[in-house]
């Protein structure tokens, strides 16, 4: 699920960044995706509005949902018997693709649109197709990714000297020694 949330960070949707991650029966990741405009449809040019009176100026007619992108991005022959992790419960259009792709389980975090017809239709299809779904309740609310952590010293939790700096230091010492005629 964390991988799904990480994928979501790439979405240009200013309102809802949704990510999805598919794993196979051995829990190996076979695809990730996030909500975005189709290839060739510039994420910076197509509209991200929600409530324009002109439907053509809203995102909904254009955006590819995270679940569909994850399925299309698969790096395996197929996604049969795989599990899909997704932040939001899949809509009816995604449910159709999920069913046809052979995914056997959906794990989601939020079902905030449970009352809406697209979710009710989605559940009706998933139930009929025998695809199980369950809510994921995270044990921890946050995971922090700290890129500087790799340079931290295990013993005292102080940043250790990055390799680049060690080299710079050694080079400085060498130049000093040369200057001193050593
Ligand atoms: N399961 C879902 C649900 C929604 N999305 C995408 C589609 C839109 O880009 C956005 C929803 O927009 P909102 O009406 O919340 O502003 O999330 C998805 O990819 N997967
Ligand atoms: Zn959808």
Image (spheres, rainbow, N blue to C red):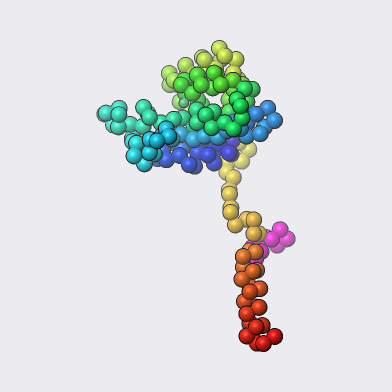
Measured as percent of width and height from the top left, residue 73 is found at 54, 32
Please tell me whether residue 155 belongs to the stretch shown in magenta.
Answer: yes
Measured as percent of width and height from the top left, residue 130 is found at 60, 15
Side of 15 relative to 75 (left or right):
left
Camera-side residue: 101 or 115? 101
What secondary structure is the stretch in magenta mostly built from? loop
Q: Is residue 2 visible?
A: yes
Please report the residue visible at 36 percent of the width from the left and 27 percent of the height from the top: 61
Please report the residue visible at 26 percent of the width from the left and 29 percent of the height from the top: 53
Q: Quadrant of residue 85?
A: top right
Q: Quadrant of residue 74?
A: top right
* Residue located farthest toward the top when viewing the structure as drawn: 128
Question: Is 6 rendered above or below residue 154?
Answer: above
Camera-side residue: 80 or 152? 80
Question: Is 31 rendered above or below residue 127?
Answer: below
Please report the residue visible at 36 percent of the width from the left and 41 percent of the height from the top: 44
* Residue located farthest toward the left when viewing the structure as drawn: 53
Question: Is 121 rendered above or below residue 63?
Answer: above
Camera-side residue: 87 or 98? 98
Side of 96 relative to 156 (left or right):
left
Q: Which residues are magenta?
A: 153-161
Quadrant where the C terminus sits is: bottom right
Measured as percent of width and height from the top left, residue 139 is found at 63, 38
Q: Is residue 20 visible?
A: no
């Amino acid at each position: 699920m964390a991988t799904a949330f990480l994928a979501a960070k790439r979405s240009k949707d200013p309102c809802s960044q949704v990510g999805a991650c598919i794993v196979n029966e051995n829990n190996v990741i076979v695809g990730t995706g996030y909500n975005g405009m189709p290839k060739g449809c510039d994420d910076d040019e197509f509209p991200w509005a929600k409530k324009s009176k002109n439907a053509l100026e809203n995102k909904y007619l254009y955006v590819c949902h995270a679940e569909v992108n994850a399925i299309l991005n698969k790096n395996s022959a197929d996604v049969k018997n795989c599990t899909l992790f997704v932040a939001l419960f899949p809509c009816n259009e995604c449910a159709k693709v999920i069913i046809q792709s052979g995914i056997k389980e959906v794990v989601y975090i939020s079902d905030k649109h449970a009352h809406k017809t697209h979710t009710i239709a989605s559940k009706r299809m998933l139930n009929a197709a025998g695809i199980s779904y369950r809510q994921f309740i995270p044990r921890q609310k946050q995971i922090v990714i700290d890129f500087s952590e790799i340079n931290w010293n295990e013993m005292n939790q102080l940043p250790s000297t990055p390799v680049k700096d060690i080299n710079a230091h050694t080079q400085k010492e060498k130049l000093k020694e040369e200057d001193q005629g050593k």
